[in-house]
Image: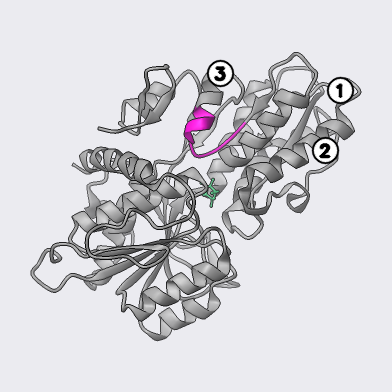
């Protein structure tokens, strides 16, 4: 049932993507009007006969592929459940996101779903939401404010762990003699997820670095040294080019490059393709299953991506929001009562908004996608289809 919903939404999502066309402008304005930078739509009344409640959905940017998927899935699911929605994308600018959320509060939203650009940059609006009694679901990225009512995400540490384990197994670090050379590229320091991804990966690989089986020729292993401002492809590309020029231009072999996500992987892959002289295949990781990266994976330029089914993340968010808005208990019982056909854990320990203040979290399970299992993991469930050229593309029905 929920799976069917996810499939229908996959179709809607691809239509929305076509309609959006890129840039951080408004989502396609449906009948009912829109504000600059927002899409607002009034729908049929909420089931149950009461007046439809309004849910504000604040996404970071349309310039990174996944947030278009998230925004579209959330919008469609909440509309289908009878809520009014306001959706904003804030061009990766914290101040703009603050304004967008402020506007939603002025419009009297009943609940906010926020994927923060800067997890530390929303205190004013979060305090306003708290004062107005508006619950906030921190979506995918934790907001470092105690008014975050709940957190819905994937198990971020496990995302990194899967990447680290992939490198470990691809290089056969437990058996091969080595030593192997590798580099790291992490995410945006303003995104609370980024250190979780990085630590998950680094914890797997650290023993091999400590034993000398893995060498990092640049010496750059601290999160801050390998972080990528706003997860930008160009920033990752620049740093990768510098590292290759400084540490590999003498013929040093590069065996692997651990990248925390697909946008950074895209930059690193470009640098390796253009500037690395060695003839070997370099193991390169990613996360999200962006279409361009899936092409690179099929072409053997990127080795894997960690896929997170954001359609399911939206399903959890919808059911959680319903429970909150209906005044029902929202804890582990939500999972047992849900009928979801995917795994999700209720976690009250792992995520703190301020020291000692834990945020109850619903965490979904990420999955490894490679050239070999791409169709099974992505096409069979309906997230993508095989295009005429043999590469995967968004589903359009
Ligand atoms: C998300 C990743 C995404 C990254 C950049 C993170 O917060 O969890 O899926 O790749 O942001 O958009």
Q: Magenta stretch: dominant SS?
A: loop
Residue 201: x and y, percent? 64, 40
- Residue sitting nearer the eye, 374 or 87: 87
Q: Is residue 291 magenta?
A: yes
**Residue drawn at (24%, 52%), measured in percent from left and top?**
338
Judge: label 2 CB < 8 Å from ligand 1.
no
Q: Of the two numbered discs 3 and 1 on the same chain, state the one appearing first in sequence.
A: 1
Q: Of the two numbered discs 1 and 2 on the same chain, state the one appearing first in sequence.
A: 2
- How far apart, in angstroms, are the residues tagged by discs 3 and 1? 24 Å
Q: Callout 1 environment at 10 Å: few (<14), some (14 to 19), or many (20+)?
A: some
Residue indicated by mark 3: 299
- How far apart, in angstroms, are the residues tagged by discs 1 and 2? 14 Å
Looking at the image, do the residues carrying marks 3 and 1 touch, with CB atoms under 8 Å apart? no
Q: Of the two numbered discs 2 and 3 on the same chain, state the one appearing first in sequence.
A: 2
Residue indicated by mark 1: 252
Q: Quadrant of the N terminus?
A: top left
Q: Closer to the observer: label 1 or label 2? A: 2
Farthest left residue in view: 49
Residue indicated by mark 2: 242
- Residue sitting nearer the eye, 2 or 23: 23
Is residue 191 visible in the rendered image? The answer is yes
Q: How many marks?
A: 3
- What is the quadrant of residue 80 in the picture? bottom left
Helix, strand or loop status at disc 3? loop
Farthest bottom residue in view: 131
Q: Callout 2 environment at 10 Å: few (<14), some (14 to 19), or many (20+)?
A: some
**Residue drawn at (19%, 57%), measured in percent from left and top?**
81
**Residue drawn at (61%, 32%), measured in percent from left and top?**
285
Which portion, as a residue range, is magenta?
285-294
Q: Which mark is residue 317?
A: none
- Compared with 188, 294 (above or below) is above
């Amino acid at each position: 049932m929920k799976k069917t919903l996810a499939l229908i939404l996959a179709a809607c999502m691809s239509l929305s993507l076509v309609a959006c066309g890129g840039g951080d402008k408004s989502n396609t304005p449906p009948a009912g009007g829109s504000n600059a930078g927002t899409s607002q739509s009034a729908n049929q009344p909420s089931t149950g006969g009461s007046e439809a409640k309004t849910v504000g959905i604040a996404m970071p940017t349309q310039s990174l592929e996944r947030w278009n998927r998230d925004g579209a899935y959330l919008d469609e699911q909440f509309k289908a459940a009878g809520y009014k929605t306001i959706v904003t994308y804030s061009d990766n600018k914290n101040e703009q996101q603050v304004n967008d959320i402020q506007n939603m509060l002025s419009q009297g939203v009943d609940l906010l779903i926020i994927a923060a650009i800067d997890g530390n940059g929303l205190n004013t609006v979060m305090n306003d939401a708290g004062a107005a009694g508006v619950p906030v679901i921190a979506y995918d990225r934790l907001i470092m404010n105690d008014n975050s009512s709940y957190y819905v995400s994937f198990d971020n540490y496990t995302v990194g762990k899967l990447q680290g384990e992939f490198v470990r197994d691809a290089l056969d670090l437990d058996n091969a003699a080595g030593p192997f050379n590798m580099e790291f590229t992490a995410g945006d320091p303003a995104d609370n997820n980024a250190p979780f991804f990085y630590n998950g990966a680094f914890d797997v690989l650290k023993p091999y670095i400590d034993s000398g089986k893995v060498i990092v020729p640049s010496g750059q292993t601290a999160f801050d040294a390998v972080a990528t401002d706003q997860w930008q492809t160009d920033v990752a590309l620049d740093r990768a080019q510098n590292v290759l020029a400084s540490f590999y231009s003498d013929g040093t072999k590069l065996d692997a490059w651990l990248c925390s996500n697909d946008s950074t992987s895209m930059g690193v892959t470009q640098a390796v393709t253009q500037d690395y002289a060695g003839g070997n295949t370099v193991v390169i990781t990613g996360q999200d299953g962006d279409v361009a990266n899936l092409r690179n994976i099929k072409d053997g330029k990127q080795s894997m991506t960690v896929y997170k089914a954001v359609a399911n993340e939206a399903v959890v968010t919808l059911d959680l929001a319903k429970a909150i808005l209906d005044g029902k208990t929202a804890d582990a019982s939500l999972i047992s009562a849900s009928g979801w056909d995917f795994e999700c854990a209720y976690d009250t320990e792992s995520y703190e908004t301020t020291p000692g203040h834990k945020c109850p979290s619903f965490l979904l399970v990420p999955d490894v996608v490679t050239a070999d299992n791409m169709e099974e993991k992505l096409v069979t469930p309906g997230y993508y289809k095989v295009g005429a050229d043999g590469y995967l593309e968004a589903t359009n029905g």
